Image (cartoon, grey):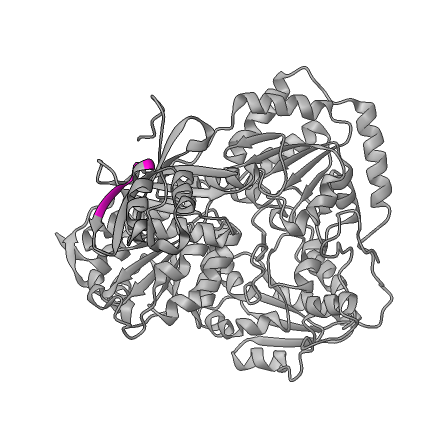
């Protein structure tokens, strides 16, 4: 039987087991929406802005190991989605974004709501397609899901002209797909792994540094096993938090620009560094020249060969799926007779404990103002450290990363690479839909939240009981911090004047709003909010305006050149 | 250092712009880029001439390999190879220069493929350096127009890039 392109699109989503599609209708996708209407396997979530659709699909993907799906119309639908797509691209999140396009005969005619979707998204997708013939539609969607989810994951855009959604053809969904030009490596090179074991067991000052790849690669258990077997210190990047339990003694906290003193010092002074699913980016190692000033041997495990020796020269590259490689490392380590020198390790740990005793995350606990760090600490206590936490971008993001001690992977959902303000709220929607009974908190600030605040309406429509933790200091806090440190206290345009009353705003959307102004009210407010299992509660915490994020590695400085409290 | 990277990629709409976009987005140099279908109609062959340190060239080849449509590639400069470029030059050829221009074309093994009473059009094939040398050898003021294809390259002997 022949099906229309629109029917085929929806059937493909069903075949892929897609439960939720986040989207916003428009002219070019009306046939697809008509088919969505006629079935109930794929549930459509209507957002209030296409950026929200892609972030929600992104949050959904980050908190599960599934591909997130968004559906937007042509022209402005696509351009609004671009921020979301770029966000997912920078953090390697598997998404399939279906975009409507004007009919094929109108392409290139400057038609109403036309834009070159493939051209606009090309630099921020893993791959994209324009489907010009309905006969290619099913296989293209199959390819899109395959490419998005395998290898180093990423977003894939499928642009479908309106006439293709109306045209008919036989439907056949391929079960598997093989592409001669795309064959991701899975197993790591056994010889390289052997060399890595020799280096690791000879190390006197070893360090294990892991990133988002361990989370995305589902390798947290293997990482914990390896770290414990070796007895080495471990640090996670912002994207990698939760891959190793944060309360464990071998965990040194996050590293990088706002990493802990002990993590950054150990990273700088180690003699053998094992990097796993991480990419030595500028927010992690600071000034690369300063990083090179100390000699160390680097072993780098990553699925993407282009991440290896990109910013830092690597001695032992191992290309492969991190879980496969870690399993092989553990296996070979168990079989090997070589063991680390316990004396050297002891000396190294003594040094690390000395760094740790610097207590770099301390803050003034006697203040009469609400300290943002205190709010996150209490959030951790009240949620028993087991919530899904999304965040926006800025100071609140760093405090959440520093003070919410993530114990499990896929619990910390934030825009690390692109640094997209407005991410937290829609991402939380995706997380809550993927985990209807889980506790989901969105840690945000009064500036970020306003970039996608319209999604409070979506939350009402689908009864998403997200808990919004708004750290309101009336400043774009991170901008203000940089202006204080590096621009002579000239707070150019970083003060948020004319803020709404957030609790009333939340109420007008049909939610519960709370304003919290005193430190002693923080914990009761959180307890009350999280006790409300069925409601979205927007907690507006009025925090100390002058609080800064420490430690801080200033731009252009080295990892050990931190500004401390 | 100059490198000639030869790429086999799926003969699909947009593949060229992905390669060009990659070079501009990551700030890599393109000296020249040529692309045409191969004997296998599903594949295109692209030759990219680029300049960069070893680290940059390593990144370029890795990033190219990452493009979904790239099937295979080789850095021809890693081994023995042949490089050829085609140039069409229109030169002024009047008076005593007319004979001189003919002689220069002969010396460089060029062919005069179009003649009027005022000018010649010369076809010249060789490495980029040879074409540069020809342009240097003739009177600059005599050059009316040059059209170059950019380099194509192939490995020597049994050095073959195929699927």
Within the image, what quadrant is residue A507 found in?
A: bottom right
Query: Is A289 left or right of B41, judged from the image as shown?
Result: right
Residue most extreme to the top: A337
| Nearer to us in this view, A163 or B15 | B15
Q: Position of residue A565 (x, y in %)?
A: 84, 58
Within the image, what quadrant is residue B46 found in?
A: top left
Q: Is A64 in the magenta?
A: no
Answer yes or no: is residue A178 visible.
no
- Please tell me which residue is depicted at 28% across the width and 46% down the height of the picture: B122
User: Vertical placement of B16 versus A473: above or below?
Assistant: above
User: Vertical placement of A222 versus B118: above or below?
Assistant: above
- Please tell me which residue is depicted at 28% across the width and 54% down the height of the picture: B94
Q: Is B110 in the magenta?
A: yes
Stretch in magenta: B107-113
- Please tell me which residue is depicted at 81% across the width and 34% down the height of the picture: A349
Q: Position of residue B21 (x, y in %)?
A: 42, 53
């Amino acid at each position: 039987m022949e099906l229309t392109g629109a029917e085929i699109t929806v059937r493909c989503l069903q075949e892929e087991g897609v439960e939720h599609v986040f989207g916003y209708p428009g002219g070019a996708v009306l046939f697809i929406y008509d088919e969505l209407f006629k079935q109930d396997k794929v549930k459509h979530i209507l957002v209030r802005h296409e950026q929200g659709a892609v972030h929600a699909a992104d949050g959904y993907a980050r908190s599960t190991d599934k591909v997130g799906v968004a559906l937007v119309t042509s022209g402005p639908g696509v351009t609004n989605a671009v921020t979301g797509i770029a966000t997912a691209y920078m953090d390697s999140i598997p998404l399939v974004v279906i975009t409507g396009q004007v009919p094929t005969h109108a392409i290139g005619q400057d038609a109403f709501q036309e834009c070159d979707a493939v051209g606009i998204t090309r630099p921020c997708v893993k791959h994209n397609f324009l489907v010009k013939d309905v006969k290619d539609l099913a296989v293209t969607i199959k390819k899109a899901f395959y490419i998005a989810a395998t290898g180093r994951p990423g977003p894939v855009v499928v642009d479908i002209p309106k006439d293709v959604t109306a045209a008919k053809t036989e439907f056949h969904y391929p079960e598997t797909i093989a592409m001669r030009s795309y064959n991701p490596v899975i197993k790591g090179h056994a010889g390289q792994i052997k060399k890595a074991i020799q280096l690791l067991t000879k190390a006197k000052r070893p360090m294990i540094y892991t990133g988002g790849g361990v989370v995305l690669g589902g390798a947290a258990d293997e990482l914990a096993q390896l770290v414990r077997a070796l007895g080495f210190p471990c640090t996670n990047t912002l994207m990698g938090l939760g891959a190793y339990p944060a309360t464990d003694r071998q965990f040194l906290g996050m590293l990088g620009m706002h990493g802990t003193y002990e993590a950054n010092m150990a990273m700088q002074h180690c003699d053998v560094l094992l990097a796993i699913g991480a990419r030595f980016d500028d927010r992690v190692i600071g000034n690369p020249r300063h990083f090179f000033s100390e000699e160390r041997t680097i072993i780098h495990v990553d699925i993407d060969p282009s991440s290896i020796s990109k910013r830092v020269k690597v001695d032992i590259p191992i290309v492969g799926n991190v879980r496969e490689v870690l399993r092989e490392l553990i296996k070979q380590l168990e079989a090997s007779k070589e063991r680390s020198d316990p004396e050297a390790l002891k000396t190294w740990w003594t040094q690390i404990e000395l760094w740790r005793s610097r207590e770099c995350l301390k803050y003034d606990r006697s203040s009469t103002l609400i300290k943002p760090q205190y709010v996150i600490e209490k959030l951790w206590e009240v949620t028993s450290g087991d919530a899904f936490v999304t965040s926006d971008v800025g100071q609140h993001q760093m405090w959440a990363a520093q003070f919410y001690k993530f114990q499990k992977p896929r619990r910390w959902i934030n825009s690390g690479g692109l640094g997209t303000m407005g991410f937290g709220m829609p991402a939380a929607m995706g997380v809550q839909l993927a985990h209807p009974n889980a506790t989901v908190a969105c840690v945000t600030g009064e500036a970020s939240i306003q970039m996608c605040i319209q999604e409070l309406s979506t939350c009402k429509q689908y009864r998403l009981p997200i808990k919004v933790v708004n750290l309101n200091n009336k400043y774009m806090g991170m901008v203000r911090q940089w202006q204080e440190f590096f621009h002579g206290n000239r707070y150019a345009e970083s003060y948020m004047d004319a803020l709404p009353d957030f609790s009333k705003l939340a109420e007008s959307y049909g939610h519960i709003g709370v304003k919290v102004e005193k430190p002693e009210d923080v914990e009761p407010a959180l307890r009350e909010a999280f006790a409300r299992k069925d409601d979205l509660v927007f907690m507006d915490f009025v925090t100390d305006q002058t609080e800064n994020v420490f430690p801080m590695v200033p731009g252009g400085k080295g990892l050990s050149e931190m500004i401390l409290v | 250092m100059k490198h000639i990277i030869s790429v086999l990629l799926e003969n699909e709409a947009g593949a060229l712009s992905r390669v060009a976009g990659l070079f501009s987005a990551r700030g890599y140099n393109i000296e020249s880029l040529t692309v045409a279908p191969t004997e296998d109609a599903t594949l295109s062959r692209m030759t990219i001439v680029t300049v960069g340190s070893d680290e940059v060239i390593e990144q370029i080849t890795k990033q190219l390999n990452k493009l979904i449509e790239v099937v295979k590639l080789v850095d021809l400069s890693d081994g023995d190879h042949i490089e050829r470029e085609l140039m069409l030059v229109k030169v002024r050829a009047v008076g005593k220069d007319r004979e001189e221009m003919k002689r220069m074309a002969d010396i460089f093994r060029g062919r005069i493929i179009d003649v009027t009473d005022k000018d010649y059009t010369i076809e010249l094939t060789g490495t980029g350096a040879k074409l540069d040398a020809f342009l240097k050898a003739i009177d600059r003021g005599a050059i009316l127009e040059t059209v170059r294809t950019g380099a194509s390259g192939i490995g020597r002997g049994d050095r073959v890039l195929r699927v």
